Image (cartoon, rainbow, N blue to C red):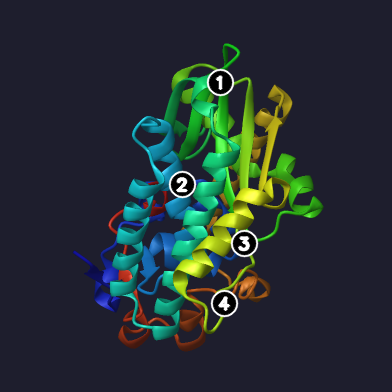
Amino acid sequence: MKKIATVEAIKKIQGLDQVRVLSNSARSSFINCRRKFLYEYIYCLKPNEIYIPFLIGSLFHSELEHLYSSPSTWSIKTMDKRVTAEIRKSVKLSTDEAVTDKLWSQRAIIIGMLKGYKNWYKGDEFKWKDIKPEMQFLVDIPHSNGWKYTGKVDLNFLLKGKRTLCEHKTTSSLDVNYISRLPLDFQILGYLWGFSEFIGVMPHSILYNVVKKTQLRQGKNEKFNDYLKRVSDDYSLYKEKYYYREPLRFGTKEIRAFVVELRKLTTEMDRAFSDDFYYMNSSTCTTYGKCAYMPLCLNGVNNDTLSRYRIKDRIHEELEE
């Protein structure tokens, strides 16, 4: 049941300032804009309106979990049924007709991505052994004020007898700039460290599993099935255009540096909690489209602006979607 956001309701929330369990998404939110972090992780607000780029990534991750958990029963038909059901749920929640139209077109993109993925990477389940999708960890951050670090590894498996992590990514741009940034991804260092602390074994490497969202759009008079075929054909014909994998290895020096930086970040967060001061970084308001929390910054936190949001059931809902 959706929890309605009101001024009185958010006063009673136990947010991250009290729970002190840090995820990579919360970390990024705090670094990029502390005001957004306040709304998202202290007040625990989530927009009522669907954010389409997140929906694509969420459904893609969910289907890869199905694929690698039960490869013998996964099929295009059952995948299509699950994706369509989730799109239908999102359509019911949407109050914006333009968003509703876009949601249905996303079905073609997700199905095309997965058809192509299955075509290009068939046989993974035979090369990889002891496959374990979606493993969540929770570990103590050393020398911090009672902080813990949590995350969910998309996939881990044995490759030639060595434990390997796999991180699924969907992106709108798959170019040299995107690829060059992969070794700097803080999330990956965090997952390597968190996973190793949680199970007691440092993984040999991490495999980046990247899929690009198509730029093809449905024509004004184009029927949906024709658009679906056009998207699916493109994904199935052009592997290098849409799919990229790269194994990465990190040494103990990089991982130790990550832990030190994470601990220092929690000190900054404790200071923000103590001072009750979360400044706004307006340079990030439109970095990935318009920030979902912009109405609160523009018009203040009141029952009118809060009507656009619900209160999350859990602080880190992003780890369960």
For marks 2 and 4 on the same chain, the one whose residue lies earlier in the sequence: 2
For marks 2 and 1 on the same chain, the one whose residue lies earlier in the sequence: 2
Q: Secondary structure at mark 3?
A: loop
**Between marks 1 and 4 in the image, the one whose residue lies nearer the viewer:** 1
Relative to the observer, which residue lies in front, 159 or 142?
159
Cα distance in 3D space between marks 2 and 4: 24 Å
Q: Residues within 10 Å of mark 2 (few under 14, many from 20)?
A: many
**Between marks 2 and 3 in the image, the one whose residue lies nearer the viewer:** 3
As drawn, is 8 to the left or to the right of 288?
left
Q: Which mark is residue 127?
A: 1
As drawn, is 139 to the left or to the right of 121?
left
As drawn, is 299 to the left or to the right of 286?
left
Relative to the observer, which residue lies in front, 2 or 278?
2
For marks 3 and 1 on the same chain, the one whose residue lies earlier in the sequence: 1
Quadrant of res 91: bottom left
For marks 2 and 3 on the same chain, the one whose residue lies earlier in the sequence: 2
Q: Residues within 10 Å of mark 3 (few under 14, many from 20)?
A: some
Residue at image location 68% in from the left, 43% down from the top? 244
* Residue 216 place in picture, x, y as percent: 62, 68
Q: Are marks 4 and 3 in contact (CB under 8 Å)?
A: no
Q: Which mark is residue 61?
A: 2
Cα distance in 3D space between marks 2 and 3: 17 Å
Q: Residues within 10 Å of mark 1 (few under 14, many from 20)?
A: few
Which kind of residue does numbered mark 4 sit on? Lys
Residue at image location 73% in from the left, 26% down from the top? 253
For marks 4 and 3 on the same chain, the one whose residue lies earlier in the sequence: 3
Look at the image and tell me whether residue 276 can be seen.
no
